[in-house]
Structures are given as structure tokens and as C-alpha cells.
């Protein structure tokens, strides 16, 4: 029954994902930016559901279960994380309509007239995307493996689910991602609140009694900042810097930022940002699920499996377990599809077309992006089956390199006295420091996120090199900033491709 | 007049961002929000504090948006 519910759910997703293919144009802009026609409903779910992934649905309860209040950092950064997009998004959208941009790096490279910058941003994006997508595949594998009691191994579960994603993303592009995310987002919200209230009630008699028992037996889990991975108290520096780097990096995640180019108008982008915290509150029931596992009689193999583990141990109807399975798959797929689509679009548009200079017709670019989706999934899949850590740690690492885009995007859209050399030097050095200290955390002078050190180096070099290489505003700079600052949608489309 | 109103809105939003950010990290969160008690609706204070910041942030951004040109027009 459980497997049947999961199969029906996957088939429904496939159908919802394939239908929009007929409605979009055969251009790269149609495939990557949905012909810039997305309204509030789809924008709300495409941003919300893209963000709420296996990381939130499995990793959130996993952290609440094993590290307690440390998990609250996810809700904390969400309070402010999308706000920069309120200002950056409409500016980027105006530029996209005017110049035909469909990716973040195209926009940056155009401002500074530096093609290698697009290539560098494509490389850093892929460095951030591969672990993030791996996390989604790993989550999907955990779910199918748990609910079939190991009959479907995790590696096969991940392959089945992402086979479905591959089909609808390749066929329908961003519209397929948008409409499946709307369907999956509604499904996830219902499931999360249902399970978040049901499990504490079934196991402890309610939310209040559950926290009373945890406060009496494991109070260290309920005091911020919770516990580190080794079970010792987490450092305030680690907690606070995790919140900070996530706020800085959130709006400039390339797959999220690219959605500025899909929106119908500026007002749609702003309303999406305003409504975003209503999606964020959906983390609360996920925490309740994790805390419900603290005093559960048995323990899962890894903390991320606490939710499926509890469901399989409890006497509950198989249909409910099947629905959970579908909800968790929704969480994984709704992020994984957007990431695979964005990563492939970036690799082709920013890497091959912009940086390498392989300018080809629209049909060829679309075919390359489809091949890119396949390659990204294979790379992520291989990482997923090799990785042995937890889901949230994987995402927290990915925020380091991606956070380095924040000064770049801000400088591109707002600052006059910056140069391409300054942006390039800052991004290169900041990313290198972040990746280096991420791999060797023992080299950090203080226990704060590696991405914060990278940001300091990034901003310092951006300013210093820009001062040294500034030769005055070019005509391109003036035209670029004029369009970014002009209110209201631009009507003329001047596609570059 | 319009420029003054925009400047005031931006200043108030900026102030809110600073206050909210401070409330979510060390040392303000550590001093005021990190404890288990008092519990509200059964939830520990450490969680209620963050949920409260999130709700307040929603209201602040909503007010900023509703008083802007987008919605007023």
C-alpha cells in the first residue's frame, strides 16, 4: 500500500510536470525563464517549495532530534533571508526584460563586460549546487528505503525518484518545475502540520506534555544554541555565524535568484517576498516531529531518518505512511528539480555560451541544457551514495561558496565605483578561502562559519582592487544602472541570444 | 514629500532589520531568548522567541510593502 501511494504520487507529479510543456515558447527564454510570465501563485510556491527541501523535511526533524535548539537557526535565518530579494529582484527583473538575461552570472558579466566572470560564477554555482542536489537525492533514497523496510535500497530509491524529475524538467523546463512545486508545496504543508501535531499527541498526549518530558530528561536540547554534532554544547559563534551566512547567501542562490527573470512584473516579486514567512512557519511542525523522537524507545540509523523510523515503528495505517512518503518525496523533488534545471542552465548559458564563447542557436542551447540536467544529476547522485554525513551539515557547507555571490550581486545592481577586476578578485579569493576552511575547519582562527571568513576577504578585495583599477563610469555602466534604477517594467525586449 | 516618505520607510525598515538580526543571534538571543521557560502554548521559550521574530518580521515587511508605491497605486 505504501509503495502504491508513492507510485501514484510520482505519476501525478509526472503528469503535472509534463502538461506545461505545450504552453511555453521553444526559446531558451521559454525553457529557462518561462517567457517571463509567472504570476504570484506559482512564484510563491516555486520560491517556497524550492527552499523547503529534503533538508527541511528530513534534516529539520533530524537536527531537532539529535541537536535540539540548534535546528532553530533554520527558522531564524528565514526571518530576514528573503528580504534582500525585495530590492534586488525587481532590479534584476528589469535588466532581464531589457537585455534578455536568464541567469544571474549573465547579468554580472554584462555589467562589467567580463566573460571570465560568468565562468567563475558558473564554477562556484556548481560547487554549491552539487552538494545541495546530492542532499535531495539522498533524502529521497532514505524515504523509499525506510518505508519499504529496505526492500528498495537507498541508491535505487534516489534513482527512481530523480528519474521522474529528469523527465519533466527536461521536457517542460521552469514551467514544469513551477507547477509541480505548486502541487508539491500544498501537499507538504498539509502533511507537515498533520504529522507535526499527530506524533506528539500519539506519543506523549500533546505538544505541551512532550516538551515537559523533554525539559525534565534532556533540558540541554531545549536551550539555545543546542548541541553540536558530537553532542557537546554548540558554540554561540557557530550558531550566530550560521544564521548570518545563511541570510547573506539565501537571496543569491542562483536557482532562486533566477526566478526574478521568470516573474510577470516587479509587484509579483515584491509580494512573493512579503508572503514568504508564511511558508517559513511550516518549519515549526517539522521541529515538533523531531522532538517527538527524542524519547522514542528506539533510535534510527542516522538522525535524518527519525521521521520514517518512527512511522514504521508505530501502529498507524499504511495509507498514512504512504502519504508521508509522498510528502517527503515532494520536499526532495520540489527543490531538486529547480536545482538541476538551474545548474544546467547556468553551466550552459554562463559557462559554455558566455565564458567560453560557444554561441549557438536556441534549439542547440536547449539540447545542451537537457544534457546538463542529466550530467548534474549523475554527479550529485554519485556524491549522494558516497556521502555519510547529515543533510543539514551538507547544506550549511553549500551556503559558504554561494554566500560569496552576495557582494557581487549587490555591487552589480547598486554600486558605481566598482570594477570587473575587483569583483573577480573578491569572488575568487572569497570562494577559495571558504572552500579551503570548509575542508580544514581546524585552520579557522575562531569557531565561526568558513563562509564568513570568505566574505571578509571577498569584500576587502572587491573594494581594494576596485579603487586601484577604477577608470570612471563607462557607457555600458550608465545604461545598465539606468535600466536597473528605472521604475516600472521595461517594455522593449532585446534578447541577446 | 514622496521622497521624505520613502526615506522614512527605508530608515524604519533598516532599523527593523538591525533589531531583528540582533534578536536572532548572540548576545541578545543568548540573554533574552535561549531559556526553556516560560513556555507558551507548550513550546519552549527558545523556540517561541524565534517564531515571534519571524511573525514580527512578516508584519514589518508587510507594512513596508503596503505603504509603498506598488500597492498604493
Image: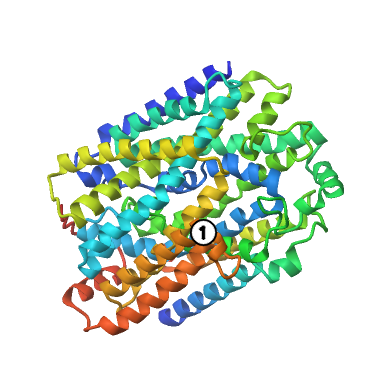
The residue where tag 1 is placed is A440
Q: Quadrant of residue A13?
A: top left
Quadrant where the N terminus of chain A is found in the figure: top right
Most foreground residue, A261 or A355:
A355
Give the answer, above or below, for where A183 lies relative to B17.
Answer: above
Most foreground residue, A266 or A235:
A235
Secondary structure of the residue carrying numbered label 1? loop
Q: Residues within 10 Å of mark 1 (few under 14, many from 20)?
A: few
Q: Quadrant of residue A325?
A: top right
Q: Locate residue A371, reporting x and y percent.
A: 26, 37
The chain holding disc 1 is: A
Horizontal side of residue A444 vs A231, given as left or right: left
Task: Name the residue located 67 percent from the left edge and 30 percent from the top edge.
Answer: A309
Most foreground residue, A68 or B58:
A68
Give the answer, above or below, for where A460 lies relative to A67.
Answer: below
Q: Is any part of residue A36 visible from this angle?
A: no
Q: Locate residue A198, reporting x and y percent.
A: 72, 33
Horizontal side of residue A229 vs B41, given as left or right: left
Task: Name the residue located 39 percent from the left edge and 32 percent from the top edge.
Answer: A165
Q: Locate residue A451, reporting x and y percent.
A: 49, 63
Amino acid at each position: 500500500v505504501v509503495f502504491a501511494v508513492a507510485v501514484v504520487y510520482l505519476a501525478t507529479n509526472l503528469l503535472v510536470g509534463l502538461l506545461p510543456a505545450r504552453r511555453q515558447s521553444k526559446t531558451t527564454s521559454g525553457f529557462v525563464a518561462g517567457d517571463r510570465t509567472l504570476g504570484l501563485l506559482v512564484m510563491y510556491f516555486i520560491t517556497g517549495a524550492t527552499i523547503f527541501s529534503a533538508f527541511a523535511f528530513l534534516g529539520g526533524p533530524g537536527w531537532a532530534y539529535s541537536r535540539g535548539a540548534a535546528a532553530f537557526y533554520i527558522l531564524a535565518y528565514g526571518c530576514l533571508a528573503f528580504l534582500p530579494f525585495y530590492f534586488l529582484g525587481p532590479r534584476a527583473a528589469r535588466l532581464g526584460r531589457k537585455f534578455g538575461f536568464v541567469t544571474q552570472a549573465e547579468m554580472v558579466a554584462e555589467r562589467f563586460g567580463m566573460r571570465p566572470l560568468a565562468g567563475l560564477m558558473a564554477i562556484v554555482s556548481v560547487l554549491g549546487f552539487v552538494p545541495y542536489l546530492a542532499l535531495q537525492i539522498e533524502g529521497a533514497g532514505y524515504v523509499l528505503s525506510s518505508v519499504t523496510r529496505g526492500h528498495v535500497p537507498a541508491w535505487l530509491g534516489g534513482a527512481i525518484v530523480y528519474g521522474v524529475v529528469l523527465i519533466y524538467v527536461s521536457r517542460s523546463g521552469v514551467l514544469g518545475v513551477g507547477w509541480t512545486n505548486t502541487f508539491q508545496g500544498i501537499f507538504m504543508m498539509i502533511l507537515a502540520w498533520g504529522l507535526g501535531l499527530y506524533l506528539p499527541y500519539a506519543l506523549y498526549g500533546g505538544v505541551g506534555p512532550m516538551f515537559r518530558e523533554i525539559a525534565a530528561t534532556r533540558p540541554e536540547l531545549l536551550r539555545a544554541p543546542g548541541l553540536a554534532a558530537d553532542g557537546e554544547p554548540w558554540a554561540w559563534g557557530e550558531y550566530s555565524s550560521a544564521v548570518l551566512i545563511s541570510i547573506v547567501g539565501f537571496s543569491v542562490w542562483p536557482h532562486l535568484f533566477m526566478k526574478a527573470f521568470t516573474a510577470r512584473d516587479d509587484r509579483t516579486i515584491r509580494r512573493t517576498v512579503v508572503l514568504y514567512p508564511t511558508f517559513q512557519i511550516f518549519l515549526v511542525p517539522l521541529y515538533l516531529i523531531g522532538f517527538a523522537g527524542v524519547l522514542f524507545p528506539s533510535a534510527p540509523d542516522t538522525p535524518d531518518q527519525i521521521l520514517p523510523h518512527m512511522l514504521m515503528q508505530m501502529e498507524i495505517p499504511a495509507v498514512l505512511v504512504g502519504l508521508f512518503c509522498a510528502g517527503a518525496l515532494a520536499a526532495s523533488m520540489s527543490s531538486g528539480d529547480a536545482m538541476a534545471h538551474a545548474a544546467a542552465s547556468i553551466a550552459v548559458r554562463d559557462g559554455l555560451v558566455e565564458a567560453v564563447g560557444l554561441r549557438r542557436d536556441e534549439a542547440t542551447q536547449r539540447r545542451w541544457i537537457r544534457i546538463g540536467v542529466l550530467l548534474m544529476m549523475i554527479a550529485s547522485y554519485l556524491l549522494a551514495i558516497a556521502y555519510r554525513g547529515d543533510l543539514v551539515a551538507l547544506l550549511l557547507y553549500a551556503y559558504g561558496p554561494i554566500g560569496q555571490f552576495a557582494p557581487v550581486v549587490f555591487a552589480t545592481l547598486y554600486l558605481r565605483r566598482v570594477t570587473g577586476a575587483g569583483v573577480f578578485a573578491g569572488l575568487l579569493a572569497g570562494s577559495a578561502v571558504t572552500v579551503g576552511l570548509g575542508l580544514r575547519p581546524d585552520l579557522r582562527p575562531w569557531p565561526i562559519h568558513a563562509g564568513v571568513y570568505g566574505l571578509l576577504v571577498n569584500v576587502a578585495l572587491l573594494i581594494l582592487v576596485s579603487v586601484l583599477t577604477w577608470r570612471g563610469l563607462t557607457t555600458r555602466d550608465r545604461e545598465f544602472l539606468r535600466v536597473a534604477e528605472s521604475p516600472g517594467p521595461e517594455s522593449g525586449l532585446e534578447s541577446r541570444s | 514629500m514622496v521622497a521624505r516618505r520613502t526615506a522614512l520607510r527605508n530608515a524604519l525598515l533598516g532599523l527593523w532589520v538591525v533589531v531583528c538580526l540582533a534578536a536572532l543571534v548572540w548576545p541578545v538571543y543568548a540573554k533574552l531568548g535561549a531559556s526553556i521557560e516560560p513556555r507558551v502554548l507548550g513550546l519552549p521559550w527558545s523556540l517561541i522567541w524565534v517564531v515571534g521574530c519571524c511573525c514580527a518580521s512578516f508584519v514589518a515587511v508587510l507594512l513596508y510593502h503596503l505603504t509603498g508605491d506598488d500597492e498604493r497605486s
